[in-house]
Amino acid sequence: MLLTKLLFIVLIIICILFYILYLWDFALVLLIVVTALPIIMFITTYIAKKNITVEFAVKDKNITKNSDFPVQLVVTNNSIFPIGKANAKIEYYNVFTGQLSAFDLYLPVQAKNSQRVTFRLCSKFCGIIKIKTSCLYIYDPLKIFKFKAAENISTEVNILPDGHEISGIVQYTDRVNEESDIFSEHRPGDDPSEVFDLREYNPGDKLNKIHWKLSSKKDEFIVKEYSMPIDVPCAVFLDLKSYTSGAYDLPVIDTVIETFLSLSQFLLDNERGHSVIFFDASQNCFTEEYIHDTSDLNKFIKKLFSSFTDSMDCLPPDKYFFDNPDLSFASFTYISSSADQGVLGTIDEDIDADIKNAFIIAESEKKLFETDGAFSSLNITPVLVGRISASIKDIEI
């Protein structure tokens, strides 16, 4: 573009000399045309700049991992002057790391028209992919002038985590919410306030379980099976604070979230509602959400993603434990990428729970954490990045 400007300056100088040396009308007309042309290009391109709009169009903003998704850059020129060339600088990054990637898009935009350019992205890890144009440069048809337009237009796409199958045992406990009316649909229990099923009498059944009115009608003993309450105080603490740096930062956080998702699905499959404690960066505080079914889990994942900020600031877990000293659960599970001895010791000694687990995410086998029996009531399970199913086997929760 600098070369073009120099050529026009040289051309104007030549036309001036030509007009001085020759008094023909043609020399005057040529000088006026050559001098006016850059001025016209400047004015028309400036008007086009004031009448240009830029936006991103994304059909689906919730995408599964490892799936290509299309993004359209839409440039609309509402002026009557064409844009000879537009250059959009596209930047994108995952908020979990902030590691920036960039590329350029080139396109012409006709007058009173829109130009759409489609590009495709893909992510191996869950998170929020933020896409933006740092700026859009437009050029006049002769490429003499360049103007900056439509800065910092952005959109974002949620890359959803995958659930993994894990195996284990869900223990049933006496710690239930006695005022709850949530009962198992598949297992009988000992709560006489709700009848689970009716069946024929078997030797050894207690007499107080016999349904006397129904037995008299059927002329045989019918026994009531009571229901099992499943509203159990079960909690999962999700530590989203990043304790790594560099190439492993994104895989570790991805594994932390997918470990939680896998555990939550496992609990729901076993009719165990649970609460999730996590740091909401958008509110700058710890918060607790309750999950009773798959719908709740899907809503929570969306809320979890909406809580992320670019800075990914997160208070340490011991702040929550210090502010809440009287925690009591039937089951408590801690998920983190840090094997902080102080935090693990607090869970082991200060949290009142029948079963306590800690899933510690390790970036490699060399980083696996070994407890050496340091904690009396806390079961620690190392989870290797990308190997959730293989790491979590036969857990008791």
Image (spheres, helix red, strand yellow):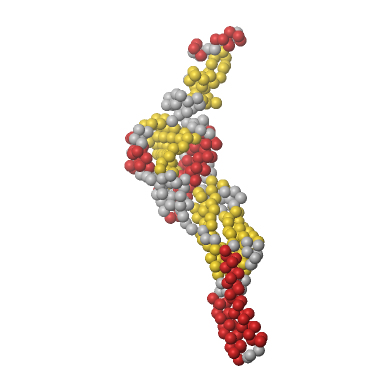
Residue 191 in sight: yes
Residue positioned 59% across, 62% down in the render: 51
- Height in image: 129 above or below 345? below
Left/right of residue 318 with respect to residue 152 in the rendered view: left
Residue positioned 63% across, 67% down in the render: 81
Q: Nearer the viewer, residue 174 or 302?
A: 302
- Height in image: 63 above or below 197? below
Q: Nearer the viewer, residue 55 or 36?
A: 36
Locate the N terminus by quadrant.
bottom right
Q: Quadrant of residue 149?
A: bottom right
Q: Nearer the viewer, residue 154 or 254?
A: 154
Q: Quadrant of residue 357?
A: top left
> x and y percent of residue 77 in the render?
62, 62
Residue positioned 55% across, 79% down in the render: 6
Q: Quadrant of residue 41?
A: bottom right
Residue positioned 51% across, 33% down in the render: 292
> x and y percent of residue 242 in the render?
41, 49
> x and y percent of residue 200 in the render?
57, 14
Left/right of residue 359 with respect to residue 85 in the rendered view: left
Locate the C terminus by quadrant.
top left
Residue 366 in sight: no
Left/right of residue 73 with respect to residue 128 in the rendered view: right
> x and y percent of residue 228 in the render?
49, 23
Count of labels shown?
0
Left/right of residue 140 with respect to residue 310 in the rendered view: right
